[in-house]
Amino acid sequence: MDLLAPLIVIVLLGVVVWLVSGPLRTGAGAADEAETARRDDLEAAKEAKYREIRDAELDHRTGKLSAEDWRALDRELRAEAMDLLRRLDELG
Amino acid sequence: MAPVGQACLILALVTCAYGIAASLYGARAGRRDWVASGRRSVYGLALLTSAAFAVLEVAFLRSDFHFDVVATHSSTTTPTFYRAAAAWSSQEGSLLLWVWLLSLWSSLVLFLVRRRLRDVAPYATAVLLGFGAFFTALLVFAVSPFGTVAVAPPEGSGLNPLLRHPSMMIHPPMLYSGYTLWAVPFAFAIGALVVRRVDADWIRATRRFALAAWFFLGIGILLGARWSYAELGWGGYWAWDPVENASLLPWLTGTAFLHSVMVQEKRGMLKVWNVSLVLATGTLAVLGTFLVRSGILDSIHAFGASTLGVPFVSLIAVMIAGSVFLVVSRRAALRSEHRLDSLLSREAAFLGNNLVLVGLAFVVFWGTFFPLISEAVTGTKAAVGPPWFNRYTVPLALVLVLLSGIGPVIAWRRATLANVRRNFLWPTAGALATLGALLAFGVTGSVTALIMFVCAAFVAGVLGQELWRGVGARRAMTSEGPARALVSLVRRNRRRYGGYTVHLGMAVLFVGVAASSAFQHARDVRLTPGGSATVGGYQITYVKPTARVVQRDGGIERIALGAVLDVRRDGRKVGRLHTERGYYPSAAPFASGGLVSGLFEGEATSEVGMKAGLLRDVWTVIQPDPEYLSKVIAGVAQRTADKPVAQQERAVSGLIGVYERGVFPAQFRLLISPLVAWIWLGGLIVFAGGLIALWPAPDAARGRVRAGYAARVAQDLDRA
């Protein structure tokens, strides 16, 4: 037990140091990562926009949104979704 | 293994400090490697606190009384089930549980957003690690769970008997999960304010965590209510106790936040309100942790006064000051993108719901802290009781339930009269029919309860109608069968229908609260075996006394004196109740009057006798008459105090026999409470709704389609 306790602490310390220093040792791919991050942000925005389109459609079908209001809103939301797709394509 | 636990805590504190510095440096210098290193510090914190928590749990399970905290909060006679939970009955253990849960949730959110919110995430990481550093510093410097003694005592003090209830295994981790999960949206809100990126992105990234925080906190509160009802022996489920209130505060403001963020996501409005709400909720979550551990307010939950007041108050002051500074200095960026178009709109309904929820939170806050406020102003500590809380919260709760029916069916931006007529006609008719039926059945004893029943019927009508129309719309689009259409509808719109389910559950829950508060019958009676009492139309007869010694691991865990009662209505037997009063040995049973008096000088708890039903609960607890009983106990104790243990144990057995054969009178509290089961049922519906909303949405739209953009949007929408 006397030896085990320091051994466990040393192992834990080693694992944490290895874990935390990983990015500093290998150097994070800044350019690639930036592009991936931008893509993930746009994907999240696209999913949110799709959800809004579906919500608006369901509101219309369950009588909470008139046909005229829904068409205008749907057009606007789809235009925003298309813009997000365009920006995603630009990232390649 | 105590040094291992202590070393883990010290390493955790160092890791937090490093992670904060690395995250802030990486963010300021644009160094992604340092930002990633800071994020990994959170994973390191999770590893180290998991190890520390494991060391503590093993010590409790093994009854290792070398650990101070184990000796003072557990014993060999504590059942294994409760030994595992005893870790968080102590202040030290509960603070460790807090930081452990925080580290797990923080690791999860930072892993999920590791490639998103690149500007916000490093500051959020620093805030989360700041919380981690605060709590690990408390554990290292103020209240270490790894304090030891050279010679372990042969036996521990045992777990507080009141905490020996299955709810107590789960209640604290649920509450603490809720508290710590609120730290996540709090931290991202701070990050968003720091970098002035106050659009809805940070809300979307942390929405599921906010929902999970609300979910776990709600479960914790409900389990606490259940524990109070089944264990505390007073017959109620909510006492407006300061610690109960402290958990309710972040739940109320968090509920408001979950509604108002939808307005920001849809319309870009209420940005100041939303960040203020989430910052307040995060601060109230820390305040809740502080109250449960500090003992600054008199509460059945404040498990001993502590020395943590100054650090906690300092942290809360920093959180408030920092939040106010950031919101004020970023007010230009937080300007709304749209204005409220009409008071007859969903935005307005959400705003109304928010005002009611925040109003409720204010009432609860004021009532909870009134003793401190009155002491500061007048020098006298005065408390407000349930009647004061009820005066303000009941009308607000009525409005809240009504709004939970209006919100789901009113249109965004502006509702027309035709829209209102179409959506409210049938639910209103259903509510009026309910009113007529209730009056016809003579339910006239309480106007507020009657209004609540009618509001709940309105909510049920609205939600039923929504589901009916939604299924109809789905069938019209896909020609699916009704059951399949319902499943598809909910699956494709989890957030919406999860929310509706929550509203229905809350309506059911409030019906239970209203009925059980307004129509409860209660009596305190003194009965001898064979005696009867009538309460709420039920005749309750004390059939016979019961007594037993509960042994565990060769020692006496408790002595239980109880009663069997028959319940009859209109001469027909409807059930049999068994209630007990359990007496646990004091920490040093052999110090003065020997084992016999030691058993009655320790803690005592009530085991409730209950026949629960969907329409009413028949509930009772026994309090053996102390006057008669104490004479017998004193006599036996005097004769056996200096005798060997075996002889004292035989004396205890003899005492049991005397009680069982005797005709000792006992006090009983008898309650007939209608619809209490609806509270638990409503809670289950609420959490089913929470689970539906939390469940991840299908990800079919992720695939990339090479086609015209309009066609691609349509195709993605069809596939999801």
Image (cartoon, grey):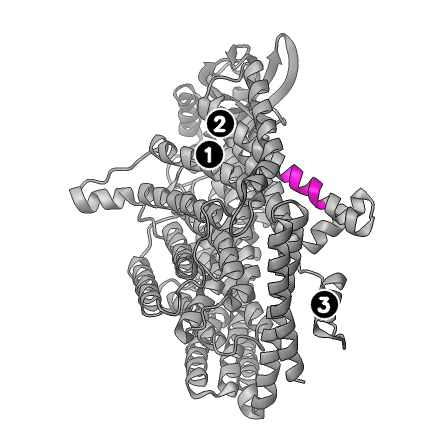
Distance from disc 1 to disc 3, alpha carbons, whole Å, reads 41 Å
Magenta region, main secondary structure: helix
Crowding around mark 2 (Cα neighbors within 10 Å: few <14, some 14 to 19, many 20+) is some
Q: Magenta region: which residues?
A: B463-470
Q: Which residue is mark 1?
A: B398
Q: Kindly identify the amino acid type of the residue bearing the numbered disc 2.
A: Ile
Q: Which residue is mark 3?
A: B701
Q: Kindly identify the amino acid type of the residue bearing the numbered disc 3.
A: Ala
Helix, strand, or loop for circle 2? helix
Q: Residue at x 42, y 27 (%)?
A: B639
Check if mark 1's residue and mark 2's residue have beta carbons within 8 Å. Answer: yes
> Is residue B674 a member of the stretch shown in magenta?
no
Distance from disc 1 to disc 2, alpha carbons, whole Å, reads 7 Å
Check if mark 1's residue and mark 3's residue have beta carbons within 8 Å. Answer: no
Identify the image quadrant of residue B381: top left
Residue A76: image location, x then y, percent = 60, 64
**Relative to B471, does residue B631 appear above or below in the rendering?**
above
Side (left or right) of B214 relative to B130: right
Q: Chain of mark 3?
A: B
Q: Please tell me which of labels 1 and 3 falls first in the chain.
A: 1
Distance from disc 3 to disc 2, alpha carbons, whole Å, reads 45 Å
Q: Which residue is mark 2?
A: B451
Side (left or right) of B433 relative to B388: right
**Relative to B541, does residue B295 appear above or below in the rendering?**
below
Residue B604: image location, x then y, percent = 45, 35
Q: Please tell me which of labels 3 and 2 falls first in the chain.
A: 2
Helix, strand, or loop for circle 1? helix
Q: Chain of mark 2?
A: B
Which callout, 1 or 3, points to the residue nearer the camera? 3
Crowding around mark 3 (Cα neighbors within 10 Å: few <14, some 14 to 19, many 20+) is some
Q: Residue at x 54, y 28 (%)?
A: B454
